[in-house]
Amino acid sequence: MLATYSQKFILPTYLVILILLNFSCQQPKRESLKDEFSSDFRIGVAVNGRQVTDEEDGADSLLHLHFNSLTPENGLKWSRVHPEEDRYSFEFGDAFVTKGKELDAFLVGHTLVWHQQIPDWVFQDQEGQLIDAELLQKRLENHIETVVGRYKGDIHAWDVVNEAFEDDGTWRKTSWYLLMGEDYIAQAFRKANQVDPNAELYYNDYNVWKPEKRKAILEMAQALRKQGVRIDGIGMQGHYRLDFPSLDMIEQAILDIHEAGFDVMVTELDVDILPRPSDFDGADLEISFAESERWNPFKDWITHEKEAELVRRYQSLFQLFRKHSDKISRVTFWGLHDGSSWLNNWPVRGRTNFPLLFDRNKRLKPGFLEAIKSE
Ligand code: GLA
């Protein structure tokens, strides 16, 4: 009787469990960027509001599988987080931190001091006249105290200052610079460090591969250190093109930043594949550019050849980054997938661009991981 029972139920159930277990072990492991580079550097991505609140289908699983660092694309910029003098908006920031905790990710705040995406009131009095250095410093300190203070211990690092230099290495004549002089940089770093002494603090800029710009940045950063101001790393934004800048230029930047004693990060990586009109100005012109096939050649789909060219560019960039993984702590993509890239709208509005490693269906572009693994 017992034997019949076990033959009928227990043994078959046991066998089914064994088969299922065996099957699940044989499931191919899903390929993951962060696993592939786990002994090299963190793999980060810039996220938007719909991605941190799970409103965008499929974003969450992509974030979990591939990324161990997040940066807010726009949500913590001054205009979003502090639109009016007495009004802060923390909806995005709070959701960003929640998502970061779910992922156990290294969170980078972006950005405390920049000349773009900042409201006019910051630099003006009620009559619209420019304020003096003292009041601007006070506003800066209040901003840092409130924003960095709110996320103390949750956001692990900050891009404290963004884009203070022109490409030729001269100071960018922003309202910060014009009102406070060079000192605004030291003030911002000092305050951020005072509010959260455990947060890492970075300077971030584009075209760091340009020697004259890099020289100015590194001199500024070293001068800060000499004054006892904390500055941990230099973010190279990494808005690259298919054939430019050269790997040699990027490599020299990595070497120089490291040699100067700073952590190197690639903070805003993307590869623009579209042609760039160099002599345009005005918004109207931009619209007609987008309508013209010449400036929007892959309006509906990208050719295999072009996609393969993009993947090869990423492959060579990551080969270089891996070669210098002792100097680079993080590589962050500027956008989760092609559909959410700012490059669909810059420098020409309304184009279809394909600058990231994930396409509009959130599929990892074929060939990248295979090529990296086979090295
Ligand atoms: C700069 C900024 C980013 C972002 C990009 C383009 O690189 O640092 O926050 O605005 O421009 O979108």
Image: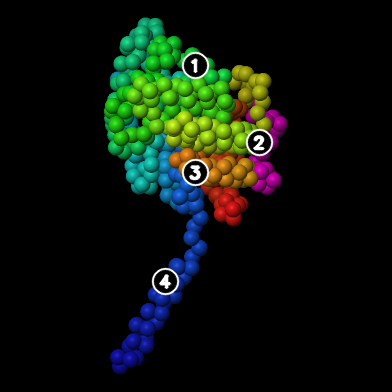
The CA span between labels 1 and 3 is: 31 Å
Q: Are marks 3 and 2 in contact (CB under 8 Å)?
A: no
Residue under the point 69% across and 36% down? 297
The CA span between labels 4 and 1 is: 63 Å
Q: Are marks 4 and 2 in contact (CB under 8 Å)?
A: no
Kindly identify which residue carries mark 3. 325
In what element is the residue under mark 2?
loop
Callout 3, which amino acid?
Ser
Q: Are marks 1 and 3 in contact (CB under 8 Å)?
A: no
- Which badge, 3 or 4, comes first in the chain's sequence? 4
In front of the other: label 3 or label 4? 3
Q: Within the magenta stretch, is there residue 320?
A: no
Disc 1 crowd rating (10 Å Cα; few below 14, some 14-19, many 20+) is: some
Residue under the point 39% across and 12% down? 180
In what element is the residue under mark 1?
loop
Residue 111 quadrant: top left
- Which badge, 2 or 1, comes first in the chain's sequence? 1
Q: Are marks 3 and 4 in contact (CB under 8 Å)?
A: no
Label annotation for residue 171: 1
- Which badge, 4 or 2, comes first in the chain's sequence? 4
Q: Is residue 366 left or right of residue 3?
A: right
Callout 1, which amino acid?
Trp
Disc 2 crowd rating (10 Å Cα; few below 14, some 14-19, many 20+) is: few
User: Between 124 and 5, which is closer to the camera in this rendering?
Assistant: 124
- Which badge, 1 or 3, comes first in the chain's sequence? 1
Percent across and percent down for residue 117 are 45, 23
State the extent of the magenta-drawn residues as a range.
Answer: 288-309
In what element is the residue under mark 3?
loop
Kindly identify which residue carries mark 2. 243
In front of the other: label 1 or label 3? 3
Kindly identify which residue carries mark 4. 21
- Which badge, 4 or 1, comes first in the chain's sequence? 4
